[in-house]
Amino acid sequence: MKTSLARRVVAEYLGTALLVATVIGSGIMADRLANGNAALALLANTIATGAALVALILTFGQISGAHFNPVVTLMDAMEKGLSWAETPYYMAGQILGGITGTLVAHLMFALPVISLSRHVRNGTSQAFSEFVATFGLLSVIWGCSRLRSNAVAFAVGAYITAAYWFTASTSFANPAVTIARCLSDTFAGIRPVDVPSFVVAQFLGGFAATALFRWLVPNLQVRAREVLLAHDTEQNR
Amino acid sequence: MKTSLARRVVAEYLGTALLVATVIGSGIMADRLANGNAALALLANTIATGAALVALILTFGQISGAHFNPVVTLMDAMEKGLSWAETPYYMAGQILGGITGTLVAHLMFALPVISLSRHVRNGTSQAFSEFVATFGLLSVIWGCSRLRSNAVAFAVGAYITAAYWFTASTSFANPAVTIARCLSDTFAGIRPVDVPSFVVAQFLGGFAATALFRWLVPNLQVRAREVLLAHDTEQNR
Amino acid sequence: MKTSLARRVVAEYLGTALLVATVIGSGIMADRLANGNAALALLANTIATGAALVALILTFGQISGAHFNPVVTLMDAMEKGLSWAETPYYMAGQILGGITGTLVAHLMFALPVISLSRHVRNGTSQAFSEFVATFGLLSVIWGCSRLRSNAVAFAVGAYITAAYWFTASTSFANPAVTIARCLSDTFAGIRPVDVPSFVVAQFLGGFAATALFRWLVPNLQVRAREVLLAHDTEQNR
Amino acid sequence: MKTSLARRVVAEYLGTALLVATVIGSGIMADRLANGNAALALLANTIATGAALVALILTFGQISGAHFNPVVTLMDAMEKGLSWAETPYYMAGQILGGITGTLVAHLMFALPVISLSRHVRNGTSQAFSEFVATFGLLSVIWGCSRLRSNAVAFAVGAYITAAYWFTASTSFANPAVTIARCLSDTFAGIRPVDVPSFVVAQFLGGFAATALFRWLVPNLQVRAREVLLAHDTEQNR
């Protein structure tokens, strides 16, 4: 029996909020403590983010599918895992959740509730990095849709841990998170003007991976429905 | 067949003692070795604590439920996972275990057995951080109660790894651990006078998450009984 | 039902490309941020690589077996897990994938597409390190072939995480990755002239482990066919 | 069908050799690269050791039980998991394996094959630390003997990761490893004269945990036979 749409959208909202609170909050903490050593700050930010993804996907995976990411939601709709009618609600929940996460992080660290980022992240190599980052993320998701759903949590957490370091953009790979991060003038921020090219590159990377995996895994649609959608918990025990 | 109450309370005592010995002991070691680099010290403290939680929840989960935390125990009693009559014994075991962990850490590092902390941790943003930290922790626990119980160990360990960095208070999220940490004038300490607001915020965060997940996961009580209570091991193999 | 050879070779190509992009890209990022602290740079490089292996083996394991490594492919053919006719296609996919990964990493970091490495890695102790590294890797793979295939992803990721530090050569342990790394004059590079002794040592280490495990695990061939080959996904759920 | 004693002893030899090569080799590498920052060196040493334990226990667990540790072997014999006649062979394999690991690490790093350590590790608090470290290790092993055996690999790796930091002695917790480490005048070494008190404390810690868990888990002996002994692989799939 499927969970109601309202519950699933709240789960997407809550999970994305906690994810963004982790990305921004751990960036603030790391930046404050690292005495200007950027490698150490990014390492702390990475470990916090990867760990949060494992915890949050295990927590919300069986309620809403734990997308937390409009690219994942759109690709899932294309593969018929989610109905088109439900797609905008998922995306709205994710975007609002991301913004809430920024607010919560700022409140915890006694900063102004909103502050537009001045962190420059532009140029072709940054956009190409986001294309690669999101191509890899969707590859991991589609590849793991063949496995029991718990493995997805570890695979996605591990992938983002790697991608923070192997891409020049530190792998945003998520439009909702990108929007939320432009509202924070801290370590993890991005200038609002740089957001559009990131988001476009992210959707293109997601499309490319989905097209490739349609060929690579012939019965992808069947599996998408089983794994990425909210599903009755009994079948997963 | 359920494990006897005496055995379960000893398991809570032992697990909380080892958890607190890790939090305080690794804080002392990290502080001694890090040459004043607070980010590096907190990273070592984080990795040790997250890893200890994975090990200890896998070890004691099937004996006592591995709460190690009065907020978890109270919420579990509210959800009928634990009887009200057993609740005070669980909490006493956790608080005494936490204090024992402090003593053991101090003995290992040749420090005075007890020392009241002078580490200031007060103000609204610290209390709000503890509210968020414990809200997130109970969300993870209730969300994962749908999964096989081994996943809870990894989810909680990963969550606390993230929360050490994304909250301004480094996520105590546990009244027994908070009390134990006020008895240690070391890296992980907290002034006794700052304990009450932390504990109140922790219980409020736990209540908020439990109320939300009652709506989010309609059959939460049934699952609470299966997952958080000590249970016959055969069903988990 | 087995996945077609074309799909499996593309999976090997793609997985090796993402693996090498991680090794080289995270090396560049770590080197840039670490202010000359080589331990911190290698730690970031290690965590990214180990995490990428977990994600990529979970992703491609059930499509192609996720070898990403000519030594693994040759040993698998010797143990009758892969037919000899398919072996050269696997190896070609891996080598081309590795080179592609180098190009992608360079493009993401706005570096020249190819640059021959000047990083000296020679001498007996380096070659012996590669022998030990690859001996250990194949031991882990054959030992875990007794387990459910998901465990292999975690075991290999954890093994390489350790081997980056316990070998003097930082554990290349993979001819395709070694070739790809000689085309990058960055942190993770190796001089082209040093490649042959690395590759020879890697194959010798792989042979030694395989010979030993033939005796240690009598029914190794039966298991190799089940675990390292691409197989129908149903049996793994 | 049980694996032959010869195969099991070789597995103990090989696993302990790779474990000690990791402990000593990663200590050498970390010490060389860390520019005198002891916290960073220990963090690298910790991550390498914890990851090696996960990989090696998954690899050898179903061949020999993956003890790699005379305390574990003795306790397992006391609980009737291993016959008394086989116990000395296990221990000899572990001790010889540990010494081999030291030699291999030294050869990889082009150091003299053997060098007696001058690293002072004495005093009551060091011995008490070893008691606590081994008490915790055996608690984790006995507690997890209720779970599927793969969980033991993650629990032990995570426990040692924590124990490197929360004990003042960096948690040797293993007589075979302690003996091997006195033959290396490097980061991970221990003076030969300090070995006996470490070993005595380790056995006492193991006894204490085993006595406690006999009461805590009434059917411990039955489970010990199933989990810690080498067993037919079919029952674990």
Image (cartoon, coloured by chain):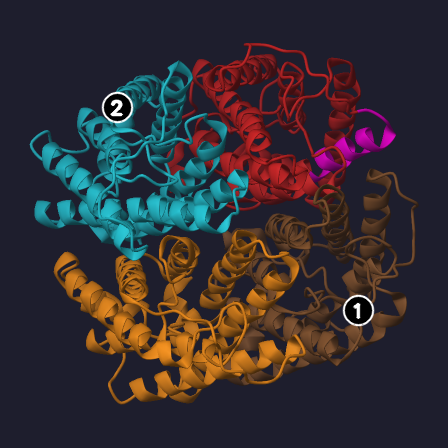
Chain colours: A brown, B red, C orange, D cyan
Mark 1, Cα crowd under 10 Å, few <14 / some 14-19 / many 20+, is some
Figure quadrant of residue A158: bottom right
Estimate the x, y position of residue C111 in percent, counting from the top left. Answer: 64, 79
Q: Which type of secondary structure does the marked residue at label 2 adopt?
A: helix
Residue span colored magenta: B122-136
| In the rendered image, residues at marks 1 and 2 fall on the same chain | no
Mark 2, Cα crowd under 10 Å, few <14 / some 14-19 / many 20+, is some
Asked if residue A128 is among those painted magenta in the image, a careful observer would answer no
Left or right, residue D216 beside residue C188 = left
Q: Amino acid at mark 1?
A: Arg
In-front residue for pair B127/B69: B127
Asked if C178 appears above or below C125 in the picture, the reply is below
Left or right, residue A197 beside residue A52 = right
Q: Main secondary structure of the magenta part?
A: helix
In-front residue for pair D34/A137: D34
Circle 1 residue: A121
Q: What is the residue that sits farthest to the left in this orientation?
A: D85
Question: Which chain contains the residue that carries disc 2?
Answer: D
Q: Amino acid at mark 2?
A: Val
Left or right, residue A156 beside residue D153 = right
Asked if C169 appears above or below D145 in the picture, the reply is below
Observer able to see residue C95: yes
Circle 2 residue: D193
For the residues carrying marks 1 and 2, which lies nearer the camera in this image? 2
